[in-house]
Amino acid sequence: MPRVLTGITPSGTLHIGNYFGAMRPAIELQAGGDAFYFIADYHSMTVITDPAERRAYSNGIALDWLACGLDPAKAVFWRQSDIPEVCELTWLLGSLTPMGLLERAHSYKDKLAKGIAPNFGLFAYPVLMAADILLFDTNVVPVGKDQKQHLEMTRDIAIKFNLTYGETFVVPEERISEEVAVIPGLDGQKMSKSYGNTIEIFGDEKALRKKIMGIKMDSRTPQEPKPDADKNLAIQLLRFFAPKDVALDYENRLRAGGLGYGDLKKGLFEHYWNYFAPYRAKRAELAASPDYVESVLRDGATRARAVADKVMARARQNCGLR
Ligand code: ADP
Ligand code: TRP
């Protein structure tokens, strides 16, 4: 049974890119019975410096995962910082990670290009991510396409450690499903918490309707045929929420002419809103039971630690620390 592991950083409110790119595939994989999912709160340190905000996003993500179907009876679910040994492992791995490897990281280069002042945490981020994965003898990591390079780095680091100190870590593989590899945001770029172009999974109905109705379209009249209908952003998003034939019907009507952009966006909103309706109800229930949610995370940390302790002992032993 392959062990599956993934994490999401609590640096904002989760959006449909996180849902289709990471959460839904992970939730499908929990049926395999060896699933490890965590809230990557150490990773949020480079993004957020307000403690209350960090706590609020972490709690929110816990609710999101559980509401969307993470089942604590099937998957181990915990907060990264409840197992601080991951930082110890980061040091062991970082001591073998070439500077050049980290300098080539797209995520790091993108942040520099955006004018974000770099710090050690930002630079070392792929090493912490490698530690997250290697600490649990992970076989498979379901992620969006933007994480592909980080998985390659994790593999490189694991292989180098194994060559240097003897067989210690399982070398993991990424799992990227092509149709949901990159969910576009409201502006057509990759949807991301840091680009301000997200459609949240949960939130205020009025505000979300406004966001979707505000998607920019071109100035062609409703009657004009649109041969490029399949490239329309609202059509692309609709495909995630509406049954295949319904999405195709919208696309055909847009292509033929006669369907206005306003009506298309209204349809997109309705399908999106109904898609998450059952999860919304579950989330409200969970939000009223913070003690239950906390107990799930504590229990998850205990179960995750049972694995982490063994792997950490192996790593220390092999490199001559104890
Ligand atoms: P963000 O870019 O919004 O900060 P994260 O980096 O926290 O998102 O990503 C958490 C998970 O969600 C990762 O597995 C990532 O690949 C996935 N993900 C994020 N944005 C998208 C997207 N637009 N399309 C597909 N997957 C995504
Ligand atoms: N870096 C990932 C992201 O920003 C989140 C993450 C942290 C992660 N550690 C991980 C994902 C380990 C998979 C496995 O999306």
Image: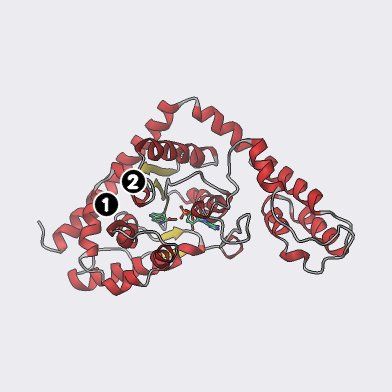
Q: Secondary structure at mark 2?
A: helix
Percent position (x, y) of residue 105? 38, 68
Disc number placed over residue 80 in the picture, else none: 2
Compare marks 1 and 2 and give the one earlier in the sequence.
2
The mark found on residue 86 in the picture is: 1
Image side of residue 198 versus residue 225, left or right: left
Residue 281 percent location from the top left of the image:
60, 31
Dot 1, how many residues are within 10 Å of its Cα: few (below 14), some (14-19), or many (20+)? many
Instruction: Report whether residue 195 is seen.
Output: yes
Q: Is mark 2 within 8 Å of ligand 2?
A: yes
Q: Amino acid at mark 1?
A: Val
Q: Are marks 1 and 2 in contact (CB under 8 Å)?
A: yes
User: For this rendering, which residue is in front, 25 or 249?
Assistant: 249
The quarter of the picture where the C terminus appears is bottom left
Residue at point 14% right, 64% down?
319
Q: Residue at x 37, y 72 (%)?
A: 104
